[in-house]
Amino acid sequence: MRLLRRTGQGVSKGLLITNVRLVDGHSDFRGDLYIEDGLISAVGRGLRIPDADVLPGGGRTLLPAFVDLHAHFRDPGYPEKEDIESGSAAAVHGGYTAVAVMANTNPVCDRPEIATYMQEKAARAGLIELYPLGTITRGIAGEELSNMDGLAPHIWAFSDDGRGVERPNVALLAFRRAAALGRPIAEHSEYRGIDDPALAEEVMVNRDLLLARRTGCALHVEHVSSVGSVELISAAKRDGVPVTCEVTPHHLCLEPGYIVNPPLVPREVRERLLAALASGVIDAVATDHAPHTAADKEKGAPGISGIETAFPLLHSRLVRTGQLDLQSLVRAMAARPARILGLNKGSLEPGRDGDVVLIEEDEEFTVTEDWLLSRGKNTPLIGQRLRGRVWATVRRGQVVHLDGKTFGRDFDDHRSIV
Ligand SMILES: [Zn+2]
């Protein structure tokens, strides 16, 4: 099936996407978008570009591609759960072109060679840009600092995700070192000794905000799940403390029941988290994509394989029900995480990276195990009907996913589908 066509006879200059509704954080209109040399070059109505590949948008909605601050690709170490190829395919299927991956692999990413292995493998797969995190402590044991100086040039932040750094003096040393290296600390805020989950989170958020305030180190709070944390972060932001934070799609949308860390929360808490996301106190949606085998999940492994369902879930449950407007969701999934990672992505202005997605807003589809490209089929959404499927994903002007098929290096480039 020919999905792209070519205008003129010359060598293609770029990709023209026609007849779409273009939505980003500050605009919403119908028209076309043209990407040349990997960058958005023009937006407008009735664009005419000689010698361009044309992707007819068919009236679909075009958004900036999503940026994920928090995913587990399980590579190196757990290919039965996921690896960088399958994780990359799942990411572009979900509309993500840039993904920050956590360090709790095997071996853990506590030295530069592991980070470069991840990035080289992602580059070979050719689908996404991958941004590793490095561990705060050696072996994620919480005892002594990792090779933070060696890791710093290869990573965007330090995190022991899966565990919080419990020892106060280890945390203090880490914040000081990270501040000197100009990298954030991304904290999995949970004191395991406290069996009230909200309080276990708030105690660590409170300590870390104090450490950020005293050391000047940027703090990123992962998967915020309590109203108390939101209040602490909001007050710290008003005081100018360098703090950002994220919330997951499942903490915004799903009823308690499925096993996740931190645990899913009741409706009143979800409503407060949503209000904080809409107001910008919570900066970003991050998936915490956590693929597991069926056997591991049965044994109680926490987490949801969620990078492919993030947008459809949020669109179906929050945007279509009028609780969140589409532009706010785009800011939370694209513009703000891109700013946190320091990327030239997240909006449709000319000059930004040519990373966009085309969404089918109205057609219903069913989430099935086969539909998921991730090896992790662990999601409570199997069998559910959602709207907001990502039909196409474009990275720097290359179609990397179209209608459930991915086009990475192995598939030559997107011209193989011309
Ligand atoms: Zn975590």
Image (cartoon, grey):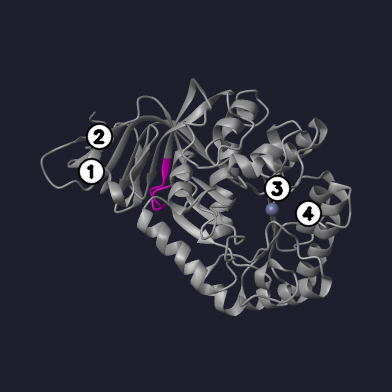
**What residue would you read off at disc 3?**
282
Q: Closer to us: mark 2 or mark 3?
A: 2
The disc, 2 or 3, on the residue closer to the chain's N-terminal end is: 2
Dots 1 and 2: beta carbons under 8 Å? yes
- Calculate the distance from the C-alpha at mark 3 to the C-alpha at mark 1: 40 Å
Seen from the viewer's position, the closer of residues 387 and 32 is: 387
The disc, 3 or 1, on the residue closer to the chain's N-terminal end is: 3
**What residue would you read off at disc 4?**
233
In the picture provided, is 266 more to the left or to the right than 376? right
- Calculate the distance from the C-alpha at mark 2 to the C-alpha at mark 3: 39 Å
In the picture provided, is 308 more to the left or to the right than 148? left
Local packing at callout 2 (Cα closer than 10 Å; few below 14, some 14-19, many 20+) is: some
- Calculate the distance from the C-alpha at mark 1 to the C-alpha at mark 2: 8 Å
Local packing at callout 1 (Cα closer than 10 Å; few below 14, some 14-19, many 20+) is: some
- Calculate the distance from the C-alpha at mark 4 to the C-alpha at mark 3: 8 Å
Element under disc 1: helix
Q: Which residues are magenta?
A: 349-356
Is disc 4's CB within 8 Å of ligand 1? Answer: no
**What residue would you read off at disc 2?**
4
Dots 1 and 4: beta carbons under 8 Å? no
The disc, 4 or 3, on the residue closer to the chain's N-terminal end is: 4
Q: Quadrant of the N terminus?
A: top left
Seen from the viewer's position, the closer of residues 49 and 410 is: 410
Residue 236 visible, this angle = yes
